[in-house]
């Protein structure tokens, strides 16, 4: 009961104010959890790409240390998740249309290494490419 000359006292929050505050809090927490899980997913994808590039780099070093490169493809596995495919393709270093008698002293090969792995329902890949020259041996003997 209110008496004349007395000011009403504060009674606290209404039920509607509490429900609105809880709804805002719920939405905020949901967004924070989604951001956190998205960060974890990106961290996992980054780890997979780093592994793939390291695997491809080691395979590239293995190929580059070989004495000879042959044109063709090959494939294999690094572990139970990552597999590789390599392609060596000879590149013509002379202009294609002009006929010349000049024989270059080297052959040029384009090396492509793809590392593939399964991430969830998608297949992901990383690719490294480089060129390699192979010095040609001479069949002519000097007299």
Image: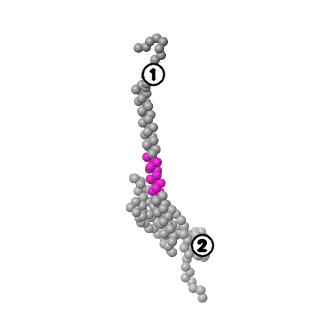
Whether residue 38 is in magenta: the answer is yes
Question: Quarter of the image holding residue 79?
Answer: bottom left
**What is the spatial separation of the Cα atoms under label 2 and label 1, in whole angstroms?**
99 Å
Q: Is residue 36 above or below residue 48?
A: above
- The residue carrying pointer 1 sits among few (fewer than 14), some (14 to 19) or many (20 or more) residues within 10 Å by Cα, namely few
Q: Is residue 47 above or below residue 75?
A: above
Whether residue 66 is in magenta: the answer is no
Query: In the depicted view, which residue is nearer to us: 133 or 23?
Result: 23
User: Please, what is the dominant secondary structure of the magenta stretch?
Assistant: helix
Q: Quadrant of the N terminus?
A: top left
Name of the residue lying farthest toward the bottom = 143
**Disc 1 element:** loop
**Disc 2 element:** loop
- The residue carrying pointer 2 sits among few (fewer than 14), some (14 to 19) or many (20 or more) residues within 10 Å by Cα, namely few
Residue tagged by mark 2? 99
Lower position in the chain sequence, tag 2 or tag 1: 1
Q: Is residue 9 above or below residue 136?
A: above
Residue tagged by mark 1? 10
Rendered location of residue 34, percent (x, y): 44, 43
Rendered location of residue 39, percent (x, y): 46, 48
Image: magenta residue range: 37-49
Residue that appears at 44% across and 12% down: 3
Rendered location of residue 57, percent (x, y): 50, 64
Residue 141 is left or right of residue 55, and the answer is right
Nearer to us: label 2 or label 1:
1
Rendered location of residue 92, percent (x, y): 56, 69
Residue that appears at 38% across and 61% down: 80
Query: In the depicted view, which residue is nearer to us: 141 or 5?
Result: 5
Residue that appears at 43% across and 43% down: 33
Q: Which mark is residue 123?
A: none
Q: Do the numbered discs 2 and 1 sit on residues whose CB atoms are within 8 Å?
A: no
Residue that appears at 42% across and 64% down: 78
């Amino acid at each position: 009961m209110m008496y004349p000359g007395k000011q009403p006292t504060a009674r606290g929050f209404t039920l509607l104010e509490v429900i609105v505050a809880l709804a805002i809090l719920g939405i905020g927490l949901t967004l924070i959890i989604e951001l956190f899980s998205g960060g974890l997913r990106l961290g996992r994808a980054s780890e997979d790409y780093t592994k793939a590039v390291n695997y491809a780099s080691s395979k590239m070093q293995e190929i580059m240390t070989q004495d000879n490169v042959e044109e063709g493809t090959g494939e294999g596995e690094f572990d139970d998740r990552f597999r590789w495919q390599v392609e060596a393709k000879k590149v013509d270093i002379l202009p294609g249309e002009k006929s010349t008698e000049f024989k270059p002293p080297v052959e040029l090969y384009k090396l492509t290494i793809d590392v593939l792995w399964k991430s969830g329902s998608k297949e992901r890949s990383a690719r490294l490419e480089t060129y390699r020259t192979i010095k040609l041996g001479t069949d002519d003997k000097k007299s």
